Image (spheres, rainbow, N blue to C red):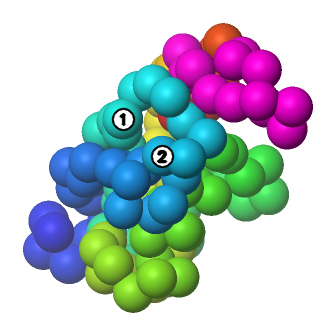
Amino acid sequence: TNGGLCCRQQFYIDFRLIGWNDWIIAPAGYYGNYCEGSCPAFLAGVPGSASSFHTAVVNQYRMRGMSPGSVNSCCIPTKLSTMSMLYFDDEYNIVKRDVPNM
């Protein structure tokens, strides 16, 4: 961290490690960096932002006791990108979707 303040940490999300490789075809994972460190109110940004797919994926790691080790939320990203995914839907059709805010 940056003197204990919130800063970005590089983190590779591997869908296999959270058991999602049975429905996600591609990509096998992505760099879904996260924030770590304390986040004073003046750095916290606007509260009430909607949860993203990225947040859900990182939380899957946390619930299983895997890295990233920080359980507490802190600063949020200022910019997110769209990621293309291929996956099986409930009827085993292959679907291509552009997932926003990754």
Q: Position of residue 50 (x, y in %)?
A: 78, 49
- State the residue position of label 2: 21
Q: Which residues are magenta?
A: 84-95
Measured from the top left, where is residue 49 in percent x and y?
A: 75, 50
Residue 94 visible, this angle: yes
Q: Position of residue 27 (x, y in %)?
A: 41, 27
The quarter holding residue 98 reads: top right
User: Do tag 1 and tag 2 residues touch (Cβ < 8 Å)?
Assistant: yes
Residue pictured at 36% horizontal, 35% vertical: 28
Q: Is residue 33 shown above or below 95?
A: below
Q: Say if residue 40 shows up in the picture.
A: no
Q: Which residue is drawn at the image coordinates 20% and 78% (left, top)?
A: 4
What residue type is disc 2 on? Asn
- Looking at the image, the residue that sits furthest to the front is 92
- With respect to residue 69, does 58 lie above or below? above
Residue 76 relative to residue 1: left or right: right
Give the camera-side residue of 93 and 62: 93
Q: Is residue 73 left or right of residue 70?
A: right
Q: Which mark is residue 53?
A: none
Q: Choose top left, top right, bottom left or bottom right for residue 57.
A: bottom right
Residue labelled with disc 1? 28
Camera-nearest residue between 83 and 86: 86
Residue 93 vs residue 64, the one in the foreground: 93
Q: Is residue 84 above or below residue 65?
A: above
For the point 63% across and 28% down, the residue is 87
Disc 2, SS? loop
